[in-house]
Image (cartoon, grey):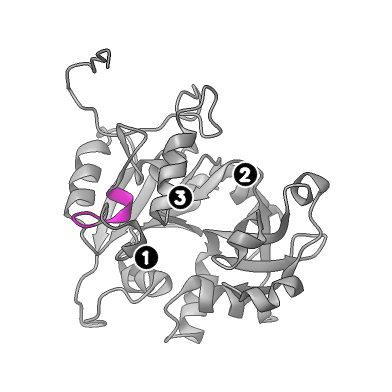
Amino acid sequence: MIKETLAVILGGGVGSRLYPLTDERSKPAVPIGGKYRIIDIPISNCLNSELKRIFVLTQYNSASLNKHIKKAFHFDIFTNGFVDILAAEQTKRSKEWFQGTADAVRQVLPRLKINEFEYLIILSGDQLYQMDFTEILNHHVVNNADVTVATIPVDSNDATAFGIMKVNDNDDIIDFIEKPGIDILDEWKSPLGDEYLNQGKEYLASMGIYIFNRKVLMDLFDEMPEANDFGKEIIPNSVRSEKYKAISFPFGGYWTDIGSIKSYFEANLTLTKFLPQFNLFDNHNHVYTSARMLSPSKVFDT
C-alpha cells in the first residue's frame, strides 16, 4: 500500500498567530527543538513509514522553506523517491493563489496525476507528532474506506479550534462539524475511554490528516468545484453523503498543533524534559533535517 500512496504536505498560509516568527518565513519553516524546522516532522514521519514520494505545497513566505527542503531532502539515483515542492502558480485552469487546503490540492492535481497512485495522504506542515502511516493506511484499506480522518481526543478548551466528529462502534464517522461554537459543544461529546474522560477530553477532533482514494478525491472535487477547504466543506459533505464511507483513525500518541505562539512555546518546553513525549532520540523514528557543519555549543557559568 505504501508504494501505491502519494503524500501531500500543506505548507500553510499566512501564519498570523505565530507572528513575529512568521514575519520572514512560513510556519513550516519556523525552527523547533534547536536544530530542526517544523516541516521536518511530517517529512520524517513519511520517510520512517517508507513513504518516499512526497510533495510539499508552498505559497506564503516560502523562500526559506523551499531552500531548507532543497538542501535537506534529496535521494540517491537508486532510490525511487523524492521530496518535491509544488508552489502556487498561475495556469490556464486557475489564475488564483491557493484559496484553502482543498483548493491547493485541486490546483496541483494535474501534477499529482502524472504519478501512479491509489491513495493520497494529506498532511499538515505545522504539527508535532510521530505516526507510522502504514497503520492508518492499513486501517483505511481493511475498513474499505473512501475517506479516513486521523482523530485525537481533546477537551472543551481545544474543541472549538478543531473539526469535531461523532463516530459509531465501527469507527464510521456519522457527523462532522468544523470549529463548533461553545454554545453547542455539549451536542458533540463522544463516548471516549476513562483514561481520556479523566483528563476532561470528551470530544473527538480531526488532526488534519486525511487519506483519500484517488477516484473518490476526483469525484468529490467534481461534485464540489467551489469547495476550498477540507475541514469546512469536503470532509463534512463526504460524511453526509450516502455515496462515500468516511471513517476515523483513532490516534493515541502525542500530538500538538503548532498554530500559535503559546503552543509553539509549550511544544519547545516539552522537548526539554528528560523523557519527552515527542522523543527526538528515538532510534526507530528519526527526525531528519539539514546537516549543519557548525562548531559545538559552549556553556559558560552565569
Q: Quadrant of residue 41?
A: top left
Q: Are marks 1 and 2 in contact (CB under 8 Å)?
A: no
Q: Position of residue 173 (x, y in %)?
A: 71, 68
Q: In the picture provided, is 69 more to the left or to the right than 33?
A: left
In this picture, residue 135 sits left or right of residue 283: right
Q: Quadrant of residue 185?
A: bottom right
Q: Secondary structure under badge 1?
A: loop
Secondary structure under tag 2 reads helix
- Where does residue 279 sit, x and y in percent of width and height? 50, 29
Disc 2 marks which residue? 135
Q: CA distance from mark 2 to mark 3?
A: 27 Å
The residue shown at (69%, 77%) is: 184
User: Residue 140 — which label?
Assistant: none
Q: Residue furthest front?
A: 302
Magenta highlight range: 23-29
| Separation of marks 1 and 2 at Cα, in angstroms | 24 Å
Position above or below: 222 against 120:
below
The reply to whether residue 166 is visible in this rendering is yes
Note whether residue 144 is visible. Answer: no
Q: Which residue bears the numbered disc 3?
A: 263
In this figure, which residue is indicated by the disc labeled 1?
113
Tell which circle, 2 or 3, labels the residue nearer the N-terminal end.
Answer: 2
Which residue type does callout 1 highlight?
A: Lys
- Asked whether residue 298 is drawn in magenta, I would say no
Residue shown at 28% from the left, 36% from the top: 75
Q: Residue at x 42, y 78 (%)?
A: 228
Which element carries disc 3, helix, strand or loop? helix
Q: Percent x, y for residue 197?
A: 78, 51
Amino acid beneath label 3: Ser
